[in-house]
Image (cartoon, rainbow, N blue to C red):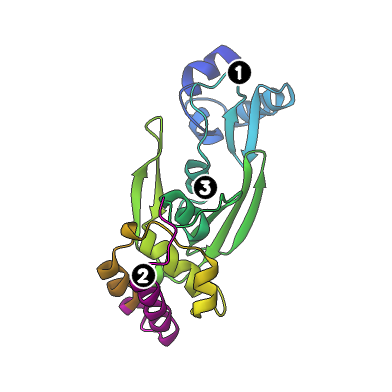
């Protein structure tokens, strides 16, 4: 395969796999050629079989949330990453944190750090397939589930002090009815206490409105 052939296949893709390129080609040869292009700086190896074209050659930039989904298929972006994306917390989050039913893992890549937190299958819900940009999509937790994921996975997070430290904002983006329904699915005293404390905060209206 020549580089011009690679560009014809993947220049409009944010990322691609060796298996995608190897369709109808010799897998060993494709891997060898990709390695050479990586050494030449024409291709960037993101992680184990996942690649993207170097910036001068690609037409679509690989959105971090899209890459997070691609690195681990059974996952969705959640916790602070999703809360920041929805505008529920004010901080910029440098790494992307996702929920998975697989093993917890941190993956360092040339495109940034991707963290995966484990939950059992009974808590793997509450996410949506959302358009990002450039016709790219990713599975992202809805605001209520992102908040509950964070509380569920963080010791002591049901306490008012922790919830206040999050500096929740844009309260109108939090569906209180859905928050209540989601909380009930946990059947957990900790999660119920957290929901009650969140409700009290929403009632006081102490968020930062943008």
Residue at 47% from the left image edge and 21% from the top image edge: 9
Disc sitting over residue 94 in the figure: none
Disc 1 designates what residue? Answer: 56
Task: Name the N-terminal-most of marks 2 and 3.
Answer: 3
Instruction: Name which quarter of the figure residue 183 lies in.
Output: bottom left
Foreground: disc 2 or disc 1: 2
Q: Residues within 10 Å of mark 3 (few under 14, many from 20)?
A: many
Q: Earlier in the sequence, mark 2 or mark 1?
A: 1
Secondary structure beneath label 1: loop
Would you say residue 145 is visible in this rendering?
A: yes
Marks 2 and 3, how far apart at CA: 31 Å
Q: Position of residue 59 (x, y in %)?
A: 49, 21
For disc 2, the neighbor class at 10 Å (few under 14, some 14 to 19, many from 20) is some
Q: Which residues are magenta?
A: 184-210
For the point 66% across and 21% down, which residue is it? 42
Residue 146 coordinates in the image, percent (x, y): 43, 62
* Residue with the mark numbered 3: 68
Dominant secondary structure of the residues highlighted in magenta in the image? helix
| Label 1 – label 3 distance at C-alpha | 23 Å
> Where the N terminus falls, by quadrant?
top right
Task: Give x and y (percent) for residue 149.
Answer: 46, 67
Image quarter of residue 143: bottom left
Describe residue 39's horizontal placement relative to residue 82 as left or right.
right
Identity of the residue drawn at 61% across and 59% down: 105
Q: x, y (%) of residue 155? A: 57, 78
Work out whether mark 1 precedes mark 3 in sequence or the reverse, and give the earlier one: 1
What residue is disc 2 on? 202
Whether 105 is drawn above or below 46: the answer is: below
As measured in the structure, the alpha-carbon distance from the residue carrying label 2 to the one carrying label 1 is 47 Å
- Crowd class of label 1 (few under 14; some 14 to 19; many from 20; radius 10 Å): few
Q: Residue at x 68, y 23 (%)?
A: 37
Of 72 and 203, the residue lying toward us = 203
């Amino acid at each position: 395969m020549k580089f011009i052939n690679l560009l014809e296949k993947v220049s409009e893709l944010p990322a691609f796999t060796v298996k995608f390129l190897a369709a109808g080609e010799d897998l060993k040869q494709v891997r060898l050629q990709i390695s050479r292009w990586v050494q030449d700086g024409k291709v960037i190896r993101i992680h184990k079989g996942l690649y993207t074209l170097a910036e001068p050659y690609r037409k679509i930039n690989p959105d971090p949330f899209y890459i997070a989904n691609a690195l681990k298929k059974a996952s969705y972006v959640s916790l602070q990453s999703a809360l920041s994306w929805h505008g529920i917390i004010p901080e910029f989050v440098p790494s992307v944190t996702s929920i998975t039913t697989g093993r917890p893992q941190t993956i360092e890549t040339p495109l940034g750090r991707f963290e995966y937190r484990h939950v059992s299958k009974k808590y793997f819900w509450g996410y949506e397939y959302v358009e990002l940009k450039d016709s790219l999509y990713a599975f992202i937790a809805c605001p209520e589930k992102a908040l509950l994921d964070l509380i569920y996975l963080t010791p002591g997070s049901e306490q008012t002090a922790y919830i206040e430290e999050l500096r929740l904002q844009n309260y109108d983006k939090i569906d209180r009815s859905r928050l209540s329904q989601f909380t009930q699915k946990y059947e957990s005293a900790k999660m119920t206490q957290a929901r009650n404390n969140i409700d009290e905060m929403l009632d006081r209206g102490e968020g930062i409105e943008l």
